[in-house]
Structures are given as structure tokens and as C-alpha cells.
Amino acid sequence: YWAKRRPNKKRRKRITMAESPVELPPLEEGEIELVEQRLVKKILREGDGECPTTGSNVEVHYVGTLVNGTQFDSSRGRDETFKFVLGQGQVIKGWDVGVASMKIGELCQLRIHPEFGYGSRGAGADIPPNAILIFEVELIGFEVVPTTAEEKFAHGEKHKALGNAAIKEQRYEDAFNAYKTALQYTQFMTTEGDDAQRYRELVSSIFLNQALAALKLERWSDVVRAASNAQELIPTAKGLYRRAVAYRRLHKLDDALMDLARAAQLAPRDRLVRNEYTAVQAAKKVAAAKERATFSNMFSRLAAMEAEEKKTAE
């Protein structure tokens, strides 16, 4: 924009919203203008409750079409909802404004002027320049982003409880993701005084439970990460045990033994710790036997090569 204009080139007139060559069609029955000549909404099914506010994490289903009926995108076709933070520019302006007017369970149609869509550039091969967009949107749910420490604690505890329930039902992927959400609210909180200890206890327990979910999913690196974060806050035999299991499966046997030694100091009678120690020792024996066999084979091959070379020389 600040580059020098080339000589002998006429300056192009900037087209304002009022002068845009594209106009939305006249309002149809049941439609309302959310923004004059830029965004039109028609409720197809009423929803309930409050509308989401700026900063809310919203979850929607949608189907997007052009005015000629050509579908260019659909979350329903992927069987996967779409999530975004409202009012942060993560989506087109027509969505930020339109979804803010919806209630949970509501299904509506949004007709969006290019100025509130993808403008004169369009988007890829599917959305041409200056395209009017039609979206059928369903608001599945939303969550207001907490701002105070107490709100963050409450959200962390809520999602931890959801993760715990999923663990009991053996829905380990759901559990892992619930703990991940809980940590998004609590992991980087600033606390002091009594809240600091409360923070350590909550976040440590979330990491510990996430390590358990990852253990069930056999995602060993995630187990190590989660258990290590828990240990930094509050050392526990459970965390050390879970990390030791992951270390064994990652063939880091010495690291596993170190964790189990510390776990045994914290919980001398823990049967799981003793059993894992036995498993690691057995794994070390197997590894040592394989190493000896490897070296034995290598030396045998070297001896055979030397014998062959000697025979050739003679």
C-alpha cells in the first residue's frame, strides 16, 4: 500500500460498501436483517436460553452453498462439528455476527454479502469473487470463557469430572480430551496464597488422570509428558509408576528403574510398583540377551571374513 505508484497508471477508485456492485436479494418471508444489506437471517428452528457472547467457545454444524444451490462446504458431510472462538476474527464476519444472535439448538439460514464473507477475492476454486453465501447453521452449544480464577477453577473441575466419568466408561479418548480441555482453563493460572496449593492439587490430579487415559490408549509419549507435568507439581507414586510403564514400552529401561525406585520410597507396599519393577528387570534381561546375540553374530561374521581373506591370500 505504501509502495510508490508506477507512472502512467490511473489510480483505481476504491469501492466502498455503499458502492459495492453486489446486492442481497429482497427480504423473504421470515427473514430479518442483522446488518443492513450485509447480513440476513431466517430462523428455521427456535433455540433455547441465552446467546453466546464475544470470546465464547462455540460449536456448530453448517452447510454452505452459493445462490445457485452449489454446495461448497459442509460439517455434516464430514460428520464433525466445527468449533471456534466467537468475535475473534477466526471466521468470516457474517458468522461472527450471525452466530452471536443464535440460541442453543437453533437452526437458521444466513445470507451473507461478500463484504461479510470472502469479498472480491473469493476463496479457492469453490467460492468465486463477490459471492453471496448461504449458510444453514445449527448452534450445538457454547461455553463462556472464564476470566476470574474462581471461574477457571470451576471449569477445570467440571471437565476433570467429565474425564473421570469417561474413564469409568472406558471411553479413554474422550477422557483424554476432557482433561486436555480442563488444562486449557487451569494450567497457566496465576495463583497465590491458599489458591496456589489448591491450584497445584487440581492441575496435578488432571495431569495424573490424563496420563492414565494415555496409558490405556498406549500413547507412551503422552504418558511421559502428562506424568512429568504432574510430578513437577506434586510428586506421587502413581505418577512415577505410570511414567515408568511408558518408559519400559519406549525401551528406556534405566529411566523406568529410576522412577520405580522413587515410587517404592513413596509407596513401599504398592503391588503395581513391585510388579512393574519385575517386568522392567525381565525386559533388561531380554535386551541384554539380544545384545549378546547381536555381538556374537557380529564377531562370528568377522571371524568368517578373516578366515576367508586368509584362505584367499594363501
Image (cartoon, helix red, strand yellow):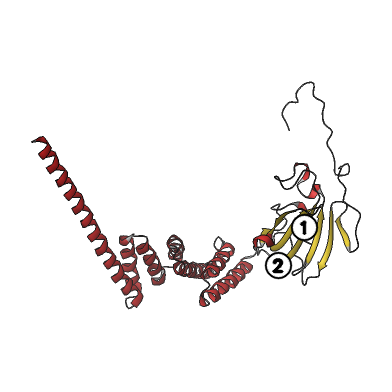
Please report whichever mark, 2 or 1, sits nearer to the chain's N-terminal start.
1
Please state the horizontal and vertical placement of residue 154, each as a whole percent of the image.
61, 71
Quadrant position of residue 62 = bottom right
Please state the horizontal and vertical placement of residue 46, each as a whole percent of the image.
81, 70
Q: Secondary structure at mark 1?
A: strand
Quadrant that contains the C terminus: top left
Q: Foreground: 217 or 16?
A: 217
Location of residue 222 with respect to 70 vertically, above or below: below
Instruction: Report which residue position mark 1 lands on.
Output: 135
Q: Secondary structure at mark 2?
A: strand
Please state the horizontal and vertical placement of residue 125, each as a whole percent of the image.
70, 45
Q: Residue at 71% across / 67% down in the picture?
A: 140
Horizontal side, residue 280 vs residue 94: left or right: left
Res 94 visible: yes
Location of residue 81 with respect to 307 vertically, above or below: below
Instruction: Report which residue position mark 2 lands on.
Output: 140
Quadrant position of residue 273 = bottom left
Q: Foreground: 153 or 126?
A: 126
Quadrant position of residue 43 = bottom right
Res 57 visible: no
Horizontal side, residue 247 vs residue 11: left or right: left
Q: Residue furthest left?
A: 314
Please state the horizontal and vertical placement of residue 216, each as a whole percent of the image.
45, 70
**Kind of residue sitting beneath label 1:** Phe
Location of residue 92 with respect to 186 vertically, above or below: above
Horizontal side, residue 249 vs residue 186: left or right: left
**Kind of residue sitting beneath label 2:** Ile
Quadrant that contains the N terminus: top right
Q: Residues within 10 Å of mark 2 (few under 14, many from 20)?
A: some
Q: Foreground: 204 or 28?
A: 28
Between label 2 and label 1, give the one nearer the viewer: 1
